[in-house]
Amino acid sequence: MNKPAICGGTPVRDTKLYYGHQYLDDADIQAVVDVLKSDYLTCGPKITELEEKLCKLTGAKYAVVCSNGTAALHMACMAAGVESGDEVITTPITFAASANCALYCGAKPVFADINDKTYNIDPEKVKAATTDKTKAVVAVDFTGQSVELDKLMAHCKEHNLVLIEDGAHVIGTKYKGQPNGSIADMTTFSFHPVKTVTGGEGGAVMTNNEEYYQKLLLARSHGITRDTALMEEEPHGGWYYEQVSLGYNYRMTDIQAGLLISQLDKLPMFSERRKEIVAKYDEAFLQMPEIQVQEEIPESDTTRHLYILRIKPEMLTINRREFFDALAAENIMCNVHYIPTYYFPHYQRLGYEKGICPKAERLYDEMMSLPLYYGMTDKDVEDVIKAVKKIVDYYKK
Ligand SMILES: Cc1ncc(COP(=O)(O)O)c(C=O)c1O
């Protein structure tokens, strides 16, 4: 067991600062109360209102909101026709759901390495990983920075693959001036409380493709339809519905939708503040040669969900684990996003070996996520910078 590294002296802060936190105001609370007093707790008008709002925000033709971002990924894979025998390419630097969605469909996740400057999936590695079994690419906009959509879309078009953008981090970001969510074949969102806007839990799939849209609707609700055009039998009466395929209960409640509609009103404000905090961090850390700052592609106007502090261990006498502990001793509580998916015992048992994505593995050894959320004060941001500087100065070689 490593001994925690501690610089000593008085901690930079006397209260703990966590890496993420939701921001809810009175309008959000009222929005939830309004739904609770209404006739519909689920399958009601707030679902349509939220879907329309997401389409307006992103410019996508269709939105299908659902219970969470994981369900959104599963639904997107189902709509893409991913099935047993198929391969789905994704990055290992993501939450497990980006690969699990392929497993849910009986397909095999294939991991492609990252670009070690932007930390997003490397389109060249996607090309190299493509086989005649590849059905889809799940490209994650890691930290909120857009993946290289032009390159990925061109490759997917050439090989007849479905591009699913895992946009769990991306809401508020634009690629070449166009909001993410309206560009890839399908884009999924997550509305977990640490994300930029939240519904408690929640997710969505955005698409411009009507065929995917119809399949997503069926996947969300048991494969059941009330649309007579999709039925095989004549309706038995006014109550009649049909299950025409296998689906799930991945529905969002109107309570979540009401909260999200209110949260989305604040997206420009959330986005601006996150950008301000990122700019302050970048400015400070670019002065420290011991820190590598995440690079941004010029096409992405990014609303950052996470801020990655990446250390250069060769310039310090401590490793990432010790740096993480030293920050905790200053009351800066980080997290690590992410453990490469194929490191997990479940994936190891499926036969994945460590070493397949060396850039991702190196990033994992060197990174931690600093506090980044709307409610942080300037003093909070300064405290984080002070703590990082204190540790770098104390442990630099
Ligand atoms: C990149 C990524 N994909 C998918 C998910 C899954 O979203 P949810 O937690 O809403 O199911 C998350 C959420 O943590 C995520 O960060």
Image: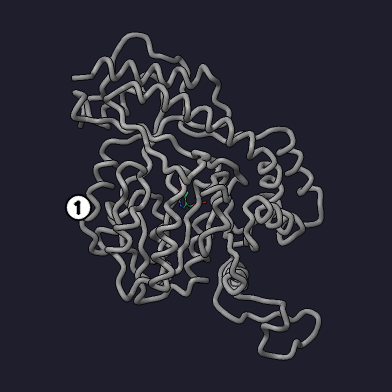
Residue 76 to residue 36: above or below: below
Q: Quadrant of residue 89?
A: bottom left
Residue 121 to residue 305: above or below: below
Instruction: Tell which of 9 and 377 is nearer to you.
Output: 377
Element type at mark 1: loop
The residue depicted at 60 percent of the width and 45 percent of the height is 200
Horizontal side of residue 319 vs 235, given as left or right: left
Looking at the figure, which quarter contains the N terminus? top left
The color scheme shown is: one colour
Does ligand 1 reach within 8 Å of label 1's beta carbon? no
Task: Residue under label 1, please give it.
Answer: 355
The residue depicted at 74 percent of the width and 55 percent of the height is 49
Instruction: Tell which of 6 and 271 is nearer to you.
Output: 271
Instruction: Tell which of 38 and 157 is nearer to you.
Output: 157
Horizontal side of residue 296 vs 359, given as left or right: right
Q: How many marks?
A: 1
**Badge 1 amino acid:** Gly
The residue depicted at 41 percent of the width and 67 percent of the height is 156
The residue depicted at 53 percent of the width and 28 percent of the height is 276
Residue 315: x and y in percent read 20, 25
Q: Is residue 71 visible?
A: no
Looking at the figure, which quarter contains the C terminus? top left
Residue 346: x and y in percent read 30, 58
